Image: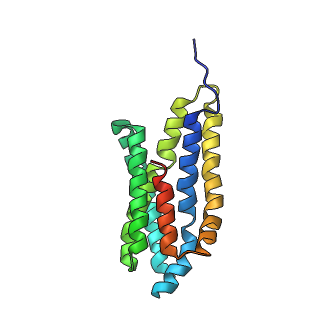
């Protein structure tokens, strides 16, 4: 006899929060290009390379974090992802060279992988009934899109009264809240 699970359940809600925060921060990085390049006199390509590295690390990290989730558990993999993500943000906030930003982008990208779709969708999918699985996965995916929509305006708003380094730290704290 199949059991019935409500569509809205704590795992779905937490999954949406994780994806929203993770993708909001990820989608905001373009906002920081001009303030960082202006402060240090960098070429815009220096910061753009960091973002490209971050995206590569995200792609490389997804199967790694999925395997970790299978081996050590979903919760531990997500916490490790959040800690990695926050560490990359904090270190980037104190970095003063393009090379530093580019190296810490690896941490940020791996952190995005650990708090992203690869791990979270698997958790939500397993927690959903057969009847609700497709809708649950669609809701989490929409939460990621919502995060992408609110990330840049949130960063812009924070930059209106905080230096970019402090905004990175605020975002790191938000990411640590996922733990």
- Residue at (56%, 71%) from the top-left corner? 30
Near-viewer residue (48 or 38): 38
- Residue at (50%, 49%) from the top-left corner? 116
Where is residue 84 drawn, in percent x and y?
Answer: 38, 56
- The correct choice, above or below, for 178 with respect to 155 in the image is above
In this rendering, would 86 be left or right of 20? left
Where is residue 73 drawn, in percent x and y?
Answer: 38, 37
- Residue at (60%, 51%) from the top-left corner? 144
Q: Residue furthest front?
A: 161
- The correct choice, above or below, for 174 with respect to 119 in the image is below
- Image quarter in which the N terminus is found: top right
In this rendering, would 83 be left or right of 15? left
The quarter of the displayed image where residue 106 is located? bottom left
Q: Note whether residue 105 is visible.
A: no
Where is residue 40 drawn, in percent x and y?
Answer: 45, 85
In this rendering, would 36 be left or right of 160? left
- Residue at (52%, 74%) from the top-left corner? 164
Q: How many numbered tags mark residues here?
A: 0
Q: Note whether residue 118 is visible.
A: yes
The quarter of the displayed image where residue 93 is located? bottom left
Q: How is the image coloured?
A: rainbow
């Amino acid at each position: 006899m199949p059991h019935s699970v409500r569509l809205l359940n704590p795992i779905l809600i937490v999954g949406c929060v994780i994806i929203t925060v993770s993708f909001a921060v990820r989608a905001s990085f373009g906002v920081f290009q001009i303030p960082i390049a202006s402060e240090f006199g960098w070429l815009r390509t220096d910061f753009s390379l960091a973002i490209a590295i971050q995206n590569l690390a995200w792609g490389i990290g997804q199967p790694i974090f999925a395997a970790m989730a299978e081996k050590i558990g979903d919760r531990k993999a997500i916490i490790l992802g959040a800690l990695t993500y926050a560490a990359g943000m904090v270190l980037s906030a104190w970095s003063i060279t393009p090379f530093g930003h580019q190296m810490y982008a690896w941490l940020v990208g791996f952190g995005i992988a650990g708090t992203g779709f690869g791990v979270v969708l698997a958790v939500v999918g397993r927690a959903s009934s057969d009847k609700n699985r497709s809708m649950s996965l669609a809701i989490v995916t929409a939460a990621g899109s919502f995060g992408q929509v609110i990330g840049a305006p949130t960063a812009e708003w924070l930059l209106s009264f905080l230096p970019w380094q402090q905004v990175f730290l605020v975002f790191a704290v938000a990411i640590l809240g996922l733990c």
